[in-house]
Amino acid sequence: MDPFSKTLWHATAEPPPETEPLVGDVKADVAIVGGGFTGLSAALHLAEQGVAVRVIEAREIGACASGRNAGLVVPNFAKADPSVVEAKLGAEAGGRLLDLVGGAGEVVFGLIKRLGIDCDAEQTGWIQPAHGPDATGAMERRCQEWAARGRPVALLDREALARLTGCDKFFGGWIDHSGGQLNPLGYARGLAKAAMDAGARIHTGSRLGRMERGGGVWVLNSENGTVRADQVLLCTNAAVGRLWPRLRRSFFPLVVHQLATAPISAALARRILPGRQAVSDTSTSLFSYRLDRDNRLISGGMAALPWGADKRMSRTIAARLDRMLDLGGVPPVEHIWIGTAAATPDFLPRLHMLGPGLHAGLGCNGRGIAMTTVLGRVLAQAALQGHGRGLDVPLSEVVPIPAHILVQHAPRVAVPLARWREARR
Ligand SMILES: Cc1cc2nc3c(=O)[nH]c(=O)nc-3n(C[C@H](O)[C@H](O)[C@H](O)COP(=O)(O)OP(=O)(O)OC[C@H]3O[C@@H](n4cnc5c(N)ncnc54)[C@H](O)[C@@H]3O)c2cc1C
């Protein structure tokens, strides 16, 4: 499948603001590489402080993960609980990261309200059900740990879950009321428009092939233009390509299929998700689903092998929706697309200083809508102060994953294998 094919979101998002490619030799205080949530949030926060900022995007706004995800706003870490984060980073640094990410749902919905972004945002909450009886204890601990940090969370018993999720196959779980859902491409385009209104310049269709330091500044070259900037923020996430090879080897690229069914009836939508929450369970082959504004069901999955994956995944994902939600038949699929997420080995986001005035932020592990919005704000702070020390996301070294050329494919095998095992239970 074309990794840049049109998605459901292209059909339902507000149009993007008008942008032009980078042409000629220009200067900026801060150059941002990448027009996804991370780069756009950084651009917005810098432009609002009067900083001359240029965003350079190879394709279009939200071309990669930001415009191709499922739109669940999830203000926590995939698999890393508060006690794990504190054990790894210490109480002070861990606590700052936890507060940042735990509050990120409120930041997203707050920004959308303040900036008037039209992206079908619904702060209805995010539910995580336990997919098996073994996972309920971990859910209770997770919920208690976030509650102890003052987050608006609650445990859900089997009955409450069945009522809220339309599925009687879960074993207990929890809800974070500050999460929810939105149209991700609409959110990215809205952030871009707000950043431009605040004075940021955004250049699309401008792939940077080279970055070098000369005359005390960074020189970034695209085919038809050059930006010279004191500070650079690399916000390329999984799409970093050859621009910074060491960075590319520091995460697992996860290729995920995402689909949207045809709209279901209002009565069925009310039966499945009466409170319109976004749901993602604890299984390794993650079962997530939500409704879009027209009551399409949106769900996803990962394929073991790329050959013939689109047809296979379309059938598998739609059949799982039918099986788990008792739809009474496999729903017709209206849109299917793929995207690539960046997963770090410990599920925590990264802030790197790659050189003088050069920072990178990445690795939001499928929690990117909430996390990248606050990561972009942290990157903006790093550019303002000229270094990334003392911020809410701790600075770390880039650590390439050993044997990355082979190991990067591990999730492609592990996740479908888990799906097969779980289906046989
Ligand atoms: C299928 C899928 C489903 C997901 N579902 C969810 C979800 O439901 N909820 C959630 O919170 N998160 C989800 N995520 C994760 C989330 O989408 C990402 O964490 C987030 O979008 C990353 O944003 P970003 O701005 O860092 O990177 P991206 O959106 O990937 O943006 C990087 C940009 O950099 C540009 N770029 C790269 N190289 C260059 C270059 N050399 N020159 C110029 N530009 C360049 C690219 O074109 C791209 O636009 C999902 C991800 C995927 C793939």
Image (cartoon, rainbow, N blue to C red):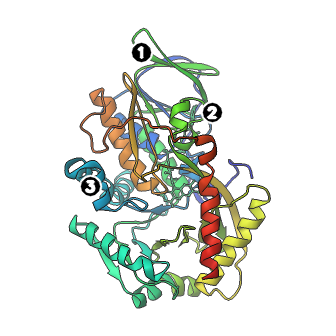
> What is the three-letter code of the residue carrying label 1?
Val
Query: Between marks 1 and 2, how big is the CA–CA gap?
Result: 24 Å
Q: Which residue is mark 2?
A: 205
Q: Which residue is mark 3?
A: 86
Q: Residue furthest top?
A: 215
Residue 252, position as x, y percentages in the image: 55, 48
Identified at 71% across, 85% down, the residue is 329
- The numbered mark, 3 or 2, whose residue comes first in the sequence reads 3
Q: Is mark 3 within 8 Å of ligand 1?
A: no
Label 2 crowding class (10 Å Cα cut-off): few <14, some 14-19, many 20+? Answer: some
Label 3 crowding class (10 Å Cα cut-off): few <14, some 14-19, many 20+? Answer: some
Q: Is residue 352 visible?
A: yes
> What is the three-letter code of the residue carrying label 3?
Glu
Q: Nearer the viewer, mark 3 or mark 2?
A: 3
- The numbered mark, 1 or 2, whose residue comes first in the sequence reads 2
Q: Residue furthest front?
A: 403
Q: Nearer the viewer, residue 98 or 406?
A: 406
Disc 3, SS: helix
Q: Nearer the viewer, mark 1 or mark 2?
A: 1
Q: Is mark 2 within 8 Å of ligand 1?
A: no
Residue 204, placed above or below residue 167: above
Question: Pointers 1 and 2 in contact (CB under 8 A)?
Answer: no
Q: Nearer the viewer, mark 3 or mark 1?
A: 3
Q: Nearer the viewer, residue 93 or 214?
A: 93
Identified at 56% across, 29% down, the residue is 243
Image-quadrant location for residue 423: bottom right
Question: Pointers 3 and 2 in contact (CB under 8 A)?
Answer: no
Identified at 33% across, 37% down, the residue is 395
